[in-house]
Amino acid sequence: MSTAATPTTTSPENPPEITRGSLIPALPDDLSIHCIALLPRFAHPTLARVSRAFHSLLRGRNPDPLLAARRRHLGLSDPHLIVSLRPPEFSSPLFFLLLPHPGWPPLPLPPPPVPVASSSSVAVDGDRMFLVGGSVSGVPSSSVQILDPRNRSWSIGPRLSSPREFAAVVALSGVLFVAGGCVPSSPFWAESLELSNSDAKWAMVPSPPHFREKWMHGSASLAGKVLAVADRGGLAYDPAAPPGEAWAPVSPVLDMGWKGRAAVVGGILYSYDYLGQVKGYDPETDSWSKVEGLEQDLPKFLCGATLANVGGLLYLVWEGKWKGKTKGKCEARSMVVIDWAAIEVTKADEGRLRGKVVSRDTIVFMGMPKGLAEH
């Protein structure tokens, strides 16, 4: 951080020298960063064009940690999406940060330290994303990798007690829960990690052996419980219940309607069925309701769409089709189109759910061959 020295005299013959910084010439850099921190992050792409110093601060591969720290101190945060794409020739997914504002370009994130395959699982706690397990060269991994999108950096967390892939992973009340994706006979088939303790280690979560022969398809936290949908019936784990009563099958109604990918918004679990309709499950009434009002605005999600809670809105992310012109077939093959839509859902009479698309955008990734594993 560079600032010029200020003379001690202030007479008209010797006026004070203006303190100059690399960002805003009339201001020292620490004050400039404070001003920039007050601006929403969707303004960063425009600001990055002002100068090389701005570009390095906002879009560089090694962002200044002072900017993220200043935003945390001011209590400022912007909801965001983290999108992962895995081209066939890459061993590990490529990660991008998207702010949910139309026209905001994707910001590449650094690759995770351990190049795990797409069989890893993801959970989010506050501003941190946990990339759990996966496979390295076809072998299940014990790695736990933590992404902090505020400063675009990865760190390594405590290793799992049991290597796993395609596990159910949920962050609930400051605890990271992991289940499945490993040898059923492992005593650490389910384990937990206290996220508030930097020195914490994974602890075994006792589980009935007859619940372990399952292939996990998805997971979520709902009504204070950890839920996992599986090929042989879903599971519910209640951390507050006595150990002998903590595990139970999920409601048959929930199990029949939960396809795998889901998101919880406002106490409702949202997924989509085999007809491509978005619907929500209310645990209070143990019933599913179709989200009405989306037929004209969204395609039917027969497969591949991802759901997320972003700032209290239901987000859908899916691979779309480019509707513009291309220079040739080669350019079209190297182009991947990702669409997203933000949906505000309200409860209507008799438990009906009404959805309204409040924002939508299309992101084009160039140089990405077809055949992506996930997004």
Image (spheres, rainbow, N blue to C red):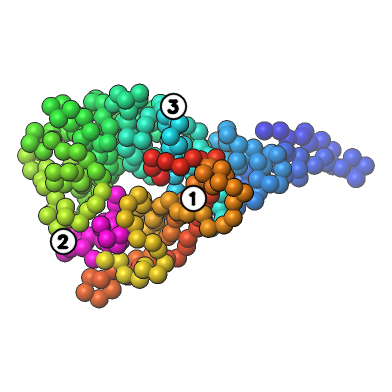
| Residue 18 on the magenta segment | no
Q: Nearer the viewer, residue 162 or 294?
A: 294
Q: Nearer the viewer, residue 283 or 69?
A: 283
| 251 shown above or below 371 | below
**Which of marks 3 and 1 precedes in the sequence?**
3
**Which of marks 3 and 2 precedes in the sequence?**
3
The answer to whether one can see residue 28 in this image is no
Q: Tell me which corner region of the image, top left, top right, bottom left or bottom right, holds residue 182.
A: top left
Q: Which amino acid is tagged 3?
A: Pro
- Pinpoint residue 187: horizontal percent, then vertical percent: 14, 27
| Lateral position of residue 325 relative to residue 129, left or right | right
Q: Which amino acid is tagged 1?
A: Val
| Lateral position of residue 82 relative to residue 16, left or right | left
The residue located at (62%, 49%) in the rendering is 327
Q: Any mark on residue 337, and which? A: 1
In the rendered image, which residue does mark 2 sit on?
Answer: 286
Q: Which amino acid is tagged 2?
A: Asp
Q: Nearer the viewer, residue 319 or 309?
A: 319
Q: Are marks 1 and 3 in contact (CB under 8 Å)?
A: no
What is the magenta range? 261-289
Dot 1: within a 10 Å radius of its alpha carbon, few (fewer than 14), some, or many (20 or more) residues? some
- Pinpoint residue 51: horizontal percent, then vertical percent: 72, 43
In the rendered image, which residue does mark 3 sit on?
Answer: 113
The residue located at (25%, 39%) in the rendering is 168
In the rendered image, the quadrant that contains the N terminus is top right
Q: Element type at marker 1?
A: strand
The residue located at (35%, 71%) in the rendering is 293
Q: CA distance from mark 2 to mark 1?
A: 37 Å
| Residue 262 on the magenta segment | yes
Badge nearest the viewer, 2 or 1: 1
